[in-house]
Image (cartoon, rainbow, N blue to C red):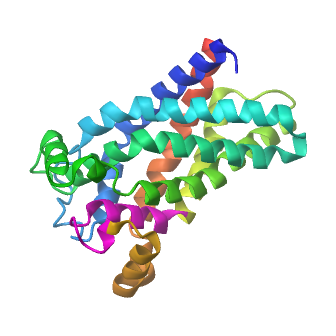
Amino acid sequence: MERKEFFASLLAGGSAGMCVDLILFPLDTIKTRLQSPQGFSMSGGFRGIYAGVPSTAIGSFPNASAFFVTYETVKCWLHSESSSYLSPLVHMAAASMGEVVACLIRVPSEVVKQRAQVSPSSTTYQMFAATLHHEGIRGLYRGYKSTVLREIPFSLVQFPLWEYLKDLWSWKQGRPLDSWQSAVCGAFAGGFAAAVTTPLDVAKTRIMLAKAGSTTAGGDVFLALTGIWKTQGFTGLFAGMVPRMAAISLGGFIFLGAYEKVRSLLL
C-alpha cells in the first residue's frame, strides 16, 4: 500500500468510525442494558443514555483507523498473491486481521464504556480508575478474547457480503457505485451480520460486566453462552438484537458510506 493510500484509510476510517459511534451511542446503551445480568431497569433504563460516551469519543478514531489500515493493507497484499475467484476469502482474511489489531484499542474503551452504561451514576473516569485500581491493566482487557470471537465472525459475514453487494450493483448498473449506494450495501451487510452474531455479543457483554473473580469474568465464551441458555434460554441469547441490528444497520450505512466517500476524496 502506498503512503497516500495508507493515510487515506487512516483518516477515512477514523472519521467514519467516530461519527457513527457518537451518533448511535444511545442505541448502544439500550442494547448493553438489555444484555446486562442486572436487567434493563436496574441498569438505568432510559436514564443517562450517554453514560460512558467519553470512552467512546477517545477510543473510536484510533480503533476504526487501525481496522481499516490493516484491512486495506492485508487486502492489497493478498489480492496481488491470489486469483479473483478467491476475493471472498481475501476479504475474510483482511477483515479478521483488522479486527485482531483494532480490538487492542477497542476492548479497553469498550470495558469502561459498558460499565459506565450500566452504572449511570458513576462517571467514565470513575469507572476507568476503579477498573485499574481493582483489576489493573488486565481488567481493561477483560473480554478481549470474547470480543475478537464476536468481531471475527461478524466481519467474516459483513465485509465479503458488502464487497459482493457492491460488485453486483456495480455490474448491474454498468459503472462504479456512488458513496450512497455503497452505504446501502453496508447497511444490509451490517444488519444481517449483527443478527447472526448477537449471542456472541451477549456473551461479550456478560463477561465485561461480570464481578471480578466470578466464573463468567474468566472470559470463557462457551461457559457464558451456556449460563445464559440455562437461565434465560433462546430469548437471553438474542437479548438486545433489535437495537443491535438497528444500530449496526444505520452504522453500516454511515460508516461504510462515509469511509468510501472520504477515502475517494483523499485519493
Residue at the spot 50% in from the left edge and 58% down from the top edge = 150
Residue 100: % across, % down: 53, 46
Q: Which of these two is toward me, 119 or 24?
A: 119
Query: In the rendered image, is residue 250 in sight?
Result: yes
Residue 29: % across, % down: 29, 52
Q: Which residues are magenta?
A: 197-217
Residue at the spot 48% in from the left edge and 34% down from the top edge = 64
19 inside magenta stretch: no
Magenta part, dominant SS: helix
In this view, 125 is above or below 76: below
Residue at the spot 30% in from the left edge and 75% down from the top edge = 215
Seen as rendered, the residue at the extreme bottom is 230
Residue at the spot 62% in from the left edge and 31% down from the top edge = 180
Query: In the rendered image, is residue 188 in sight?
Result: no
Q: In the rendered image, which quarter is residue 35 located in?
A: bottom left
Residue 126: % across, % down: 12, 44
Quadrant containing the N terminus in the rendered view? top right
Quadrant containing the C terminus in the rendered view? top right
Q: Is residue 147 left or right of residue 29?
A: right
Q: Which of these two is toward me, 134 or 117?
A: 134
In this view, 46 is above or below 159: below
Residue 242: % across, % down: 44, 62
Q: Is residue 111 left or right of residue 103?
A: left
